[in-house]
Image (tube, rainbow, N blue to C red):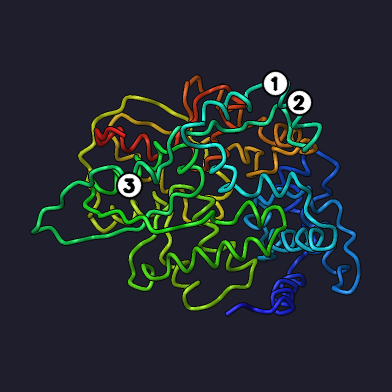
Amino acid sequence: MIIPEDHIEQSLEASLDHCIKCNICTAACPVSAVTDLFPGPKYVGPQAQRFRHARQPSPDESVDYCSGCRVCNEVCPTGVRIAELNARARARLVAERGIPLRNRLISRSGLVGRLGAGPHAPIANALLGSKPLRMVIERTLGIAREAPLPAFSRYTFRSWFRRRRAPQIDAGTPKRQVVYFHGCSANYYEPWIGKAVVAVLEHNGFEVLLPRQRCCGLPLLSNGDFAAARRAHEENVAFLAPYALRTIPIVGASTSCTLTLKEEAPELLGMQSDTVRAVAQQTYDIFEFLRLLHMRGELRTDFRPIERTLPYHPPCQLRAHRIGRPALDVLELVPGLRLIETHAGCCGIAGTYGLKVEKYRISMDVGAPLFETVRRSGADMALCDSETCRWQISHGAGVVARHPIEILAEAYGLVT
């Protein structure tokens, strides 16, 4: 069932009267703190919404500078759905004015990954590493020449998964299955993260299933292309629902992907069928799932000591899950490992936001406190659950950024 557009608008507008003009959201907004181009969540969200009308052109130029970090939702004391209001206002702009070629390109992560990853990855990486070419791309497409673009992998995670030999599970062991939603990043850029996820899950006695899947659709939602995002989510629901309806957990290591399956796509697109809800309810972020296993006494804790102190940044999309800091909860079980939460706010990249030439400087200014915190830690590595945030941290702080699941696999002694 798809909820009609006017019903979605009515639901969102029902939260407007809860706005008490306190300005907490504006005080907490990382974007309005560094640029006057974005007047703040209150003004662009609940305040501006009162002047929007379906039969009038949208006046919302500034709403496109909202990064979608959801900090406003987190801090609002009365529960106004500010981020959703802004996302839908951006979608109206797109519907009226069209989608620039740049935004069409960078929002199609699966397409870009298929074009760049594989045996020809060294050529693609060399081209994208060329400063003269990046200058041309900036001038013609509007993708900032300094923005952090990840390197394509020579092989995809799915190709590795097809070729590998899965471990044999003892006949007397109860069969437990889990679906892995790898997302575009693990498939095309960071297959070692997918390998670490599989190794950790199998070490804990799970058979890992890998059904067909598409991009989660978050880059499309963030760029206002709701029609394409709906098609992507419908396909993912069709692929994942047979497992969700059998209560087989769906686990992802990209916290942005899991939030989109759980909440962002169903809410923004008004998709509320039984199958959509089943997929949402059965979706877990990887450390959310591992923490649940530990709470049940089912997580293996045969960890090797890791004598390190590392900064850990919980990205905005993880905080939007409202599940606390599960990576910290699980990794504190590893002897000798000490993680220090950065408490530094947003990294600034916001998916594709910081790739855009007009927003690159904003993204770096937003992330500056985080970069300084990481540098001050003295560590040569930082941990973060989100791929684009890791690339931004490496770019801004000059250190290697890894997913916490890699550290857990290392503690288990698993080679990935």
Residue type marked 2: Met
Q: How far apart are marks 2 and 1 (CA)?
A: 6 Å
The residue that disc 1 covers is: 131
Label 3 to label 2: alpha-carbon separation: 39 Å
Residue 180 image position (x, y, % from top left): 38, 54
Q: Is residue 342 above or below residue 61?
A: above
Of circles 1 and 3, which is in front? 3
* Residue 155 image point, x, y percent: 43, 36
Q: What element carries label 1?
A: helix
- Left or right for 356, reference 259: right
- Which of 111/64 is in front? 111
Q: Earlier in the sequence, mark 3 or mark 2?
A: 2
The relative height of residue 310 versus residue 276 in the rendered view (above or below) is above
Q: What element carries label 2?
A: helix
**The C terminus: image quadrant:** top left
Q: Nearer the viewer, residue 198 or 294?
A: 198
Image disc number at residue 162: 3
Disc number placed over residue 265 in the picture, else none: none
Decide: few, some or many residues near mark 2? Use Cα within 10 Å; few <14, some 14-19, many ≥20: some
Check residue 135 in the rendering and tell me which mark sits there, or answer none.
2
Q: Do the residues labelled 2 and 1 touch (CB within 8 Å)?
A: yes
